[in-house]
Image: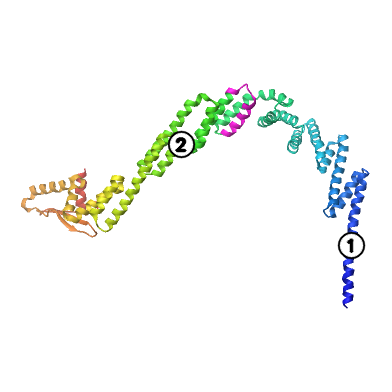
């Protein structure tokens, strides 16, 4: 049994090897058949056989040779079509050949196809072939002529921007070529139009587009050089103003430098413009300092350095901001200590700390704290007298004057029948809040005046109609 299994394995291996051998022989046979037709210059048949072979061939030296020989077949057929001026077929065959030697003919074939299309008034196809030459064969000797031909077509189509682009390439890459010389007079006649268009583009704030056109014109023409350079300067000046509105000071600086480069007569004017911008930043920074916003102030001052390095007013402003920030930091520290004393009801200590803080930074909120601490100290000393004192000073004393005037009037009318309570101070609900009363009683009429007085902030609120009326009367 074991012997039988061993014989079967040997037989199977032999079958596999034999299959591979015959397959290889069959494959190589396909290549040899194709190669025979290739040697006999029967290129059409050879291509068909090469295709059949390569469909199943394993990558290797033989397959590589097959691909190269098939390419040569297409190339040879392309040469035959080229000799017969069958440009469409030649173009197709050279494309399939896809080899360096086929490229030597392919650009010429495309050019002939373009010329035939142009002769048939098929401009779109002509331009397509020209574009293929310029894209696929950028080093072809036909490039200058193709650019010139396309330049003429664009002028005929009034596609002046495209014409300018082709001329720009002619000028930059083929400066001394005959086609560049032939194109120049034709473009010269369009110069006024290009200059006008660049001016209109600039007026629409399309600075870079205007500059792109003007740079091309400035490179090759001497006839309008002064006008073009002035326009370039104007474009950079407008770019600087736009950059300033966007707070891009580095672009402002470079644009101004270029504006002066192309028109040196503007130097004094543009220097004054820069100094004016810097002066504005200094003023902005100073206003921020007045509001104790040191970071914002420094940011404003720093903008100047992109325009004028080491600008002294900006340096001074930054130093002032840093000094102020130190005072702010110390003031904050004192405020924190004062707040702790306030929470502990040590109002005298809190007052002294707030006063020291205010001397550093005279901020409104610190001033209010000082006012409150003084009120609290007076309230602790004698709250009732303080309450009457607040009312006596309320509305610049007009309220008290009105009360006394009314009392005198009633005294003249009722004499001893008038009863006056005088000033009475009663504790109200809430810390440091009191009610202050003043009553006038007669047989015919009585007045009950009452106010709520907050000793902490010295606010006064009338609590009934008669109290409010007397306030209104005196306010009038």
Query: Which quadrant does the C terminus fall into?
Result: top left
Residue drawn at point x = 84 percent, y = 41 percent: 93
Residue drawn at point x = 90 percent, y = 44 percent: 43
Counting from the top left corner in percent of width and height, residue 291 is at 36, 43
Label 2 crowd (10 A; few <14 / some 14-19 / many >=20): some
Residue 19 - label: 1
**Can residue 324 be seen in the rendering of this structure?**
yes
Residue drawn at point x = 31 percent, y = 48 percent: 365
Report the residue marked by disc 2: 305
Q: Which residues are magenta?
A: 207-226
Counting from the top left corner in percent of width and height, residue 451 is at 20, 53
Residue 19: in magenta span: no
Judge from the rendering whether residue 324 lies leftward or rightward of residue 38; answer left or right: left
The numbered mark, 2 or 1, whose residue comes first in the sequence reads 1
Residue 215 occupies quadrant: top right
Counting from the top left corner in percent of width and height, residue 217 is at 63, 27
Scheme of colours in the image: rainbow
**Can residue 459 be seen in the rendering of this structure?**
no
Q: Compared to 451, does 278 lie above or below? A: above
Magenta span: chief secondary structure: helix
Query: Which quadrant does the N terminus fall into?
Result: bottom right
Counting from the top left corner in percent of width and height, residue 391 is at 19, 50
Judge from the rendering whether residue 145 lies leftward or rightward of residue 269; answer left or right: right
Dot 2 falls on a residue whose secondary structure is helix
Q: Compared to 445, does 310 lie above or below? A: above
């Amino acid at each position: 049994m074991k012997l039988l299994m061993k014989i079967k394995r040997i037989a199977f291996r032999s079958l596999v090897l034999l299959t591979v051998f015959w397959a290889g022989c069959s494959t190589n046979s396909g290549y040899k058949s194709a190669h025979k037709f290739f040697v006999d210059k029967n290129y059409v048949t050879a291509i068909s056989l090469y295709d059949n072979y390569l469909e199943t061939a394993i990558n290797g030296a033989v397959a590589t040779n097959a691909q190269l020989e098939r390419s040569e077949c297409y190339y040879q057929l392309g040469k035959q079509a080229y000799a017969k001026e069958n440009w469409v077929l030649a173009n197709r065959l050279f494309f399939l050949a896809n080899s360096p030697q086929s490229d030597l003919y392919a650009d010429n074939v495309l050019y002939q196809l373009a010329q035939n299309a142009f002769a048939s008034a098929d401009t779109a196809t002509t331009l397509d072939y020209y574009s293929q030459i310029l894209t696929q064969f950028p080093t072809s000797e036909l490039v200058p002529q193709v650019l010139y031909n396309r330049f003429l077509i664009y002028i005929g189509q009034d596609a002046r921007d495209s014409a300018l682009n082709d001329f720009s390439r002619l000028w930059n890459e083929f400066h001394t070529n005959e086609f560049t010389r032939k194109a120049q007079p034709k473009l010269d006649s369009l110069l006024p139009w290009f200059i006008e268009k660049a001016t209109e583009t600039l007026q629409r704030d399309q600075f870079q587009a205007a500059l792109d056109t003007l740079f091309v014109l400035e490179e090759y023409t001497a006839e309008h050089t002064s006008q073009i350079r002035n326009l370039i300067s104007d474009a950079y000046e407008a770019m600087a103003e736009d950059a300033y509105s966007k707070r891009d000071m580095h672009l402002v600086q470079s644009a101004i430098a270029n504006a002066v480069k192309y028109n040196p007569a503007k130097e004094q004017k543009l220097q004054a413009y820069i100094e004016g911008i810097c002066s504005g930043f200094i003023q902005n920074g100073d206003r921020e300092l007045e509001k104790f916003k040191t970071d914002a102030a420094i940011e404003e001052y720093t903008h100047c350095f992109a325009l004028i390095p080491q600008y002294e007013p900006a340096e001074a402003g930054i130093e002032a901001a840093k000094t102020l920030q130190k005072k702010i930091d110390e003031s904050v520290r004192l405020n924190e200590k004062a707040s702790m004393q306030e929470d502990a009801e040590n109002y005298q200590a809190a007052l002294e700390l707030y006063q020291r803080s205010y001397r550093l930074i005279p901020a409104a909120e610190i001033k209010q704290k000082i006012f409150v601490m003084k009120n609290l100290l007076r309230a602790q000393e004698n709250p009732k007298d303080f309450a009457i004192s607040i009312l006596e000073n309320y509305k610049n004393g007009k309220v008290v004057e009105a009360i006394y005037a009314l009392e005198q009037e009633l005294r003249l009318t009722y004499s001893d029948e008038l009863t006056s309570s005088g000033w009475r101070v009663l504790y109200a609900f809430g810390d440091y809040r009191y009610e202050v009363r003043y009553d006038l009683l007669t047989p015919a009429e009585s007045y009950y005046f009452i106010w709520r007085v907050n000793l902490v902030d010295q606010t006064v609120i009338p609590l009934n109609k008669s109290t409010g009326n007397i306030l209104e009367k005196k306010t009038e």
